[in-house]
Image (cartoon, coloured by chain):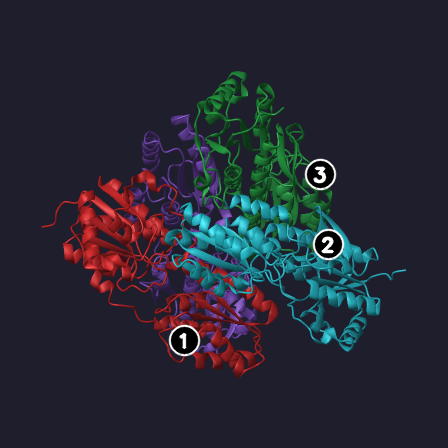
Chain colours: A red, B purple, C green, D cyan
Amino acid sequence: MSKKINTIGVLTSGGDAPGMNAAIRAVVRACSYYHLDCKGIYRGYQGLIEGDLETLNARSVRNIINKGGTFLKSTRSEEFRTKEGRAKAHEKLKQEGVDALVVIGGDGTFTGGKLFSEEFNFPVVGIPATIDNDINGTDYTLGYDTALNTVVEAIDKIRDTASSHNRLFLIEVMGRDAGDIALNSGIGAGAEEILIPEETAGVERMLESLHKSKKSGKTSSIIVVAEGEKSGKNIFELADFIHEQDEEYDIRVSVLGHIQRGGSPSCFDRVLASKLGVGAVEALMDGKSNVMIGIHHQKVDSVPLETALIGNPKVDKELRRVADITSV
Amino acid sequence: MSKKINTIGVLTSGGDAPGMNAAIRAVVRACSYYHLDCKGIYRGYQGLIEGDLETLNARSVRNIINKGGTFLKSTRSEEFRTKEGRAKAHEKLKQEGVDALVVIGGDGTFTGGKLFSEEFNFPVVGIPATIDNDINGTDYTLGYDTALNTVVEAIDKIRDTASSHNRLFLIEVMGRDAGDIALNSGIGAGAEEILIPEETAGVERMLESLHKSKKSGKTSSIIVVAEGEKSGKNIFELADFIHEQDEEYDIRVSVLGHIQRGGSPSCFDRVLASKLGVGAVEALMDGKSNVMIGIHHQKVDSVPLETALIGNPKVDKELRRVADITSV
Amino acid sequence: MSKKINTIGVLTSGGDAPGMNAAIRAVVRACSYYHLDCKGIYRGYQGLIEGDLETLNARSVRNIINKGGTFLKSTRSEEFRTKEGRAKAHEKLKQEGVDALVVIGGDGTFTGGKLFSEEFNFPVVGIPATIDNDINGTDYTLGYDTALNTVVEAIDKIRDTASSHNRLFLIEVMGRDAGDIALNSGIGAGAEEILIPEETAGVERMLESLHKSKKSGKTSSIIVVAEGEKSGKNIFELADFIHEQDEEYDIRVSVLGHIQRGGSPSCFDRVLASKLGVGAVEALMDGKSNVMIGIHHQKVDSVPLETALIGNPKVDKELRRVADITSV
Amino acid sequence: MSKKINTIGVLTSGGDAPGMNAAIRAVVRACSYYHLDCKGIYRGYQGLIEGDLETLNARSVRNIINKGGTFLKSTRSEEFRTKEGRAKAHEKLKQEGVDALVVIGGDGTFTGGKLFSEEFNFPVVGIPATIDNDINGTDYTLGYDTALNTVVEAIDKIRDTASSHNRLFLIEVMGRDAGDIALNSGIGAGAEEILIPEETAGVERMLESLHKSKKSGKTSSIIVVAEGEKSGKNIFELADFIHEQDEEYDIRVSVLGHIQRGGSPSCFDRVLASKLGVGAVEALMDGKSNVMIGIHHQKVDSVPLETALIGNPKVDKELRRVADITSV
């Protein structure tokens, strides 16, 4: 039988994502609502090992729902990957009277949380937060919607200059293993072609599509390229390769980079964070552990962390079809 | 048996919403992809009656995916409410060789489309576009996500000044019959209280919540009020009423108004518009008529226009609960 | 001879404006650079009377340059208008060892500062911060540039819906005595007509201009109205009045309101705030008092507070001319 | 004596900048106001040579004041650098009845315009438009203010993630020969250090400053680097170099790139464009030629193109001082 929970610890770990602050806020507020204590743990698992934590109350998290990043900060901890590191962390939690953990992050975060939960039979619930949307068992991860808006706003700006000069732009967006950002932002930005990690024939298709566009008189083009694109070429090599095929292209490369991780979260991400934060606390109160709280068909739901870690959902074929049709 | 479709007409009608241009673009591009002709009809049903239409091709809709409003313009047509008006419209469509219609708008648009489709056995497919998200049979309407972002960005700005002055702000957002905008933007903006049309006890609850906040030392507050709120008071009367209860409040009112209808659509709305536009053309090609193309559980789907017109979905009780918990 | 200054107090007072935080930061950082102590005074002159202040160092003001509002908060103080109130304030400053004051705000702030400085021979330097740009002796006030961007972005959104519906929009912007916001944002937003407090013939001219636009086939129009417009009608009465003249207009009113006071400051305001904050500390070190630090011809300069209080600069006739020509 | 001008041609050339559309609009509207004809020339001097131009009237330029880029498009023309090319251009202008030219762009544009004006005694007036603000004889160039806002907004986003991870970010901004963007955006974004082309000791100073920051416990840092920085290292080599000096830094590089050229112009740039566009037409009507219309001390003024071409204004020492003080 599960022990009654009095104090919940919350941390963020791995790459930061917009909405993390909103999720922390919801966890803290839900604790307050249910008369539980809440401790914020700084710098992820490393801060946990080092005992870098403090009590948070409803007012500690005022005016952070609209802030990007994570005020609890985030690191990757080598030490937590060792059994000794995790044992130290467990010791700290006992000392501090923390009965359960909410861990906010991506697959690295969940891998650590799962191990810890199993080794020490300690209640851990995960909240998926990564701009890549590459977590199994949830329709959306925190930060993904915001990142898409950041990307389309950036490409809208670049399209101004592309159109003014009749240029071809290659734009690299995040997504090492998952093409969700590239595919959605590519459709949203009206890209002429989209290269994603899940497809191998991308480059040939792109050349064909460029050729067709050129014949039809299209004078500027945007190609969105996921950083994990599988041609074996980086985006600068890709630009050179296109130029070799047809010298007439006036090509420019833009790597959007870290702006994609920051920024004030969209309303969607703030609401999602609020739902998941409340859901995580309620799951712990219900005795759940070793699960991730996700959103499925607009309902908050939990899946085992194991399921969350299965790996990337497949590329959305319908979306690829829509991309092909609307980029005619 | 349904007649083969060669030419599709597309129009926007009723209140405009961000994403309408992106939906028109997707309809035009899908027609182009499937080698159908496409005619854009200006000024909604009124333009249809007057024969104000022109052929659109893939290039006619370049660089509009990111534009707010609708380049086809939108009006409300009294004439189309009459049998004679609709007969004229039908005549025009025959003259122009248009075999099917895609109508983009809200319930007024669908009511007209349904009547027209039934009277003349004419293929009509609707695409839901209204910032209010008050259409049955689709999880989201076009423009809703963008409007939510516009609202939270506006409230973020107001929160700066509210916090600086320890003020109480009443902020009116759109939503005559549906509290979706108020509830979601209220959560997203971290509002202390949210008044929506679907609830009657709102004002008493608000007073209680304000009282509690004041005792706990909260010094500034944001109350989000849907324009259709049911207390019988408009927002200025509401401000006076609160002031009568407790003179210490330094109250300000802000009516966000029409900024909520405009602006560049969010990535979510652009992608949704692209999916629904393609879906509408494909539905017509499949012989469907008198249906709305919506999104349900992230899949494009069709429901009879009759279903779409049933009325507002109920308020989301889970969301109300999340609002109550996170505004502690 | 002026006493050596060791400790500077800084406060914000009156209506808040974007860039106040950036100015506080610059004052604090300049103190740190010159090895002076700096005390932040909360809630303006009222907080000063109540002794609500604390020491600030360079790190206290990290990550606030981009935040709207003022973290020191701002109030209007009735008590400081009395001799007794000011005497209490002076007593507090002596107790706390504060040798000089930087007061950030508009004319009310400067009136108080000037009185205080003269009564107690106490060094006071003002920094002009008000979105209205209505301070004499400086080309720009803090917050003005940001407010202009907020207004044009809001009108851009409204233009989307105005164009979609062929509507006439009356948009009220801030500016009780000064038409600078209306005139500049009106030009920037491409308004068809602009009504400002400094002109009396505005309404007649507007009607004429509307009439001309209508004849030339213009189908939607934006009229920007400063809140201090002098026709004796509020903006809703103005809308009714236009409608009485010509029933065909489909008119909507939008009062932009308090969104104009908030938001992340523009780069211009952040840089200006940094210059003025440094300038204020250096002026105090140079033995100046009873002056405002402003910007004139891109150079930081000081003028007597008396000069700053002379009243509104006149309306820029050249700008009015540009407005008339470009709204053809 | 100068010939009466009946028809003015307008073109944009060189790198595009936000505000070019607003300037074209103002030129067209001023022509309309003064009953002159106006012809828009596409693709800069190359389009002029090829006779790619059309008549523009007041309505042709509706709803473009808020659009980035240039709807007349811009190219660099090799042919116009030859005497033969310019002769062809002159021939076209005579054929089309164009009596005078407004050329919108940077130094390349003005060099061409000056030669052309002198060779054919043809009235030419320039409008400075380049995000780099590197034109002599005007306090501001079109697009500069917008680019600064784009840069600080991007760095604000990056600061979210930098703070969350205690990272050091090197951010490259535009400015091959002029550090204005770097210096202003660096101050505006609260950068810890700024490297500009006009200074040679930048790298040593940066290392010292980083060292100092680290000792004082600062845990994340933003370094803004102008692309023309003179250390002989590109930004990636600079990152490696810093890492060699101190392995503890967790360094990331972000090249902001072409987003800086696009985007909806700020209110400042829209108003400036309106003033300069009107000023250019009025200068031609006054018989001026071979001049640039600029802004000096908030007044529209003209200087010989020769003066404009003298080269970069020097780095603003006061601004550098403010940067040093506020980044303490």
Q: Is residue C233 left or right of residue C200?
A: left
Q: Amino acid at mark 1?
A: Met
Residue B262 visible:
no
Are the residues under marks 1 and 2 on the same chain?
A: no
Label 2: how many Cα within 10 Å (few below 14, some 14–19, many 20+) = many
The residue to which callout 2 is attached is: D137
Vertical position of residue B178 compared to residue B122: above or below: above
Vertical position of residue B48 compared to residue C132: above or below: below
Label 2 secondary element = loop
The residue to which callout 1 is attached is: B285
**Comparing marks 3 and 1, which lies closer to the viewer?**
3
Label 3: how many Cα within 10 Å (few below 14, some 14–19, many 20+) = few
Are the residues under marks 3 and 2 on the same chain?
A: no
- Residue A151 place in picture, x, y as percent: 45, 62
Count of numbered circles on the image: 3
- Residue C35 place in picture, x, y as percent: 51, 36
**Comparing marks 3 and 2, which lies closer to the viewer?**
2
Label 1 secondary element = helix
The residue to which callout 3 is attached is: C201
Q: Are marks 1 and 2 in contact (CB under 8 Å)?
A: no
Instruction: Quote the CA–CA distance across marks 3 and 1.
Output: 60 Å
Q: Is residue A66 left or right of residue A104?
A: right
Q: Amino acid at mark 2?
A: Gly
Q: Is residue D64 left or right of residue A261?
A: right
Q: Residue furthest bottom?
A: A245
- Residue A41 place in picture, x, y as percent: 28, 47
Instruction: Quote the CA–CA distance across marks 1 and 2.
Output: 63 Å
Q: Are marks 3 and 1 in contact (CB under 8 Å)?
A: no
Instruction: State which chain disc 1 sits on.
Output: B
Instruction: Quote the CA–CA distance across marks 3 and 2.
Output: 38 Å
Instruction: State which chain disc 2 sits on.
Output: D
